[in-house]
Image (cartoon, rainbow, N blue to C red):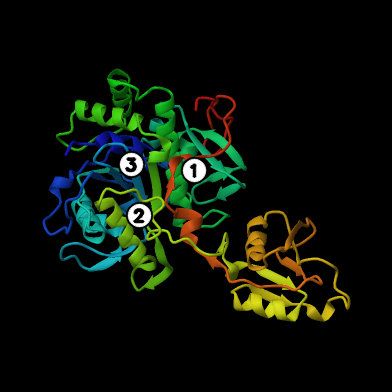
Amino acid sequence: MRRIAVALTLLTALSCGSFAGSQAVSAASAPAGGGGVGGRGTNILVVGIDSRAGLSAAEKRRLHVGGKGCNCTDVMMLVHLSQNRRRASIVSIPRDSYVEYAGTTTPARGKINSAYALGGGPLTVATVEKVTGLHIDHYLQTDFRGFEQTVNNLGGATVCTDRPLKDENSGLDIGAGRHLADGNGALRYVRARHVNLRPGDLGRVRRQQRVVDDLLARLTAEGALAGPISTARTVRTLLKTVRTDEGTGLDDLVRIGWALGRLRSDRTEFATVPIRLFDHRVPGSGSTLVWDEARSAALWDALGADRPITGDTRIQPVAENPAPTDPARIAVRVDDAEVATALRANGFVVTDISATAPAVRPSGPPVIRYATGQEDDAATVAAALPGSRLQADPDLDAVVEVTVGARPVQVSSVTYDRNVADGAPVTADRLRCAEAPAAAGAAQPGSAVEPSGRR
């Protein structure tokens, strides 16, 4: 199969860092017994290493990566390019995924990011092959250093959020909207996992995917991958901060980069491995993520068969009545005892205030009142109360209030799937930040700036 390190070059430059000071490990050097099986298309494993080795105190402060590194993988993306080069599927594998390692390591199971600490790139490749059943054709690894230079060389990276986003650990602090960030700001954006909104790895990897998509789209829109000459120029720029595996020639990179530049946004897919348990406690490993066995198996099966992953209901079942947020995290005050009981049975945290309800109910359906910033929670309550009316109330606290009217109320069961909120298979045109940028600029570390108009 043709080498495709350009895909890695482009993606890795966005995911976590650069190759300065890192070692590229060919998938061919993986130990025997990895369990991978050949399939159609080409699979590339891209990882970013959590290491502070070689960083000065000033660099750590600038990059906001203080503390002790774990010498483990912090970012992991599996890139599948279809055999006909007309589709790319990029799947994020959360760092805390609880898996069985390849070979005879001790311990035999643990977080997937620890495979690197136990056996470097070869064991990482073999472990991914074992748990996915896919053969890894190419492997690339990165570290933190050089990321800001790579992003700056590409003209910055678009970051976006529908609400203000802050994470003291990574230094991220941006307002709602779409912004062009410099390399430092982009690093904080893709590393943030303790944010004020939906903390954890799934939200973080979705942000990483958006940055990857943005840079690929911008390189394409600006003609950087439009032909052999422009692609070669782009590859040479990237190779200033990126190192590939041995045996990969510039011609290989140009050929694959040119193919990437011809991909339509609706033929580029992003997803995160479906999770069944989000806080599986394991002695010695702490909190881990357990994959949804059936859905993750369907994901790897689709990639192995060179099929699209978007629209596959085996990977992402379609819920009859989906909820955007978790009912177990929504406090609701209800002035009707029967409705309160039904909502409580549906998983909501309910306070029954029916004792203070008016003797004569107002006409019409239930009214759901909510404070600013609780739109998603209110939508979840509305999904459980079909036909209800939503009403914003800035004077409310963090509790959604339901006032039942004279009309009979039906309480429906809702399905909350966190995988949908943060990691469902989606094409790039739907993943992309929505607002159009306006003006050029360069971000300061940890900040957002006026975005570029080149899109």
Rendered image: mark on residue 243: none
From the image, tell me which residue sits under label 1.
Answer: 430
Q: Is residue 447 above or below residue 418?
A: above
SS label for mark 3: strand
Image marks 1 and 2: residues in contact by CB distance under 8 Å: no
Q: Which mark is residue 88?
A: 3
Q: Does the rendering let one see residue 39?
A: yes
User: How many numbered discs, if any?
Assistant: 3
Residue 188: percent from left, percent from top = 48, 43
Three-letter code for the amino acid on which mark 2 is drawn: Ile
What type is the residue that disc 3 sits on? Ala
Q: Quadrant of residue 283?
A: bottom left
- Pinpoint residue 50: horizontal percent, then vertical percent: 35, 50
Q: Nearer the viewer, mark 1 or mark 2?
A: 1
Q: Is residue 245 left or right of residue 311?
A: left
Q: Are marks 2 and 3 in contact (CB under 8 Å)?
A: no
Choose the circle earlier in sequence order: 2 or 3: 3
In this view, the residue farthest toward the front is: 408
Mark 3 burial class by Cα count in 10 Å: few <14, some 14-19, many 20+: many
1 or 2: tag closer to the N-terminus: 2
Q: Which residue is mark 2?
A: 93
Check the picture and name the quadrant holding the N terminus. Answer: top left
Image location (x, y in percent) of residue 74:
36, 51
Mark 1 secondary-structure assignment = helix
Residue type at mark 1: give it.
Arg
Q: What is the secondary structure assignment of the residue under circle 2? A: loop
Q: Looking at the image, is mark 2 or mark 3 nearer the viewer?
A: 3
Q: CA distance from mark 2 to mark 3?
A: 16 Å
Residue nearest the viewer, comparing 101 with 366: 366
Q: Is residue 90 left or right of residue 395?
A: left
Residue 355 higher or lower than 419, as above or below: below
Spatial separation of the CA atoms under disc 3 and disc 1: 15 Å
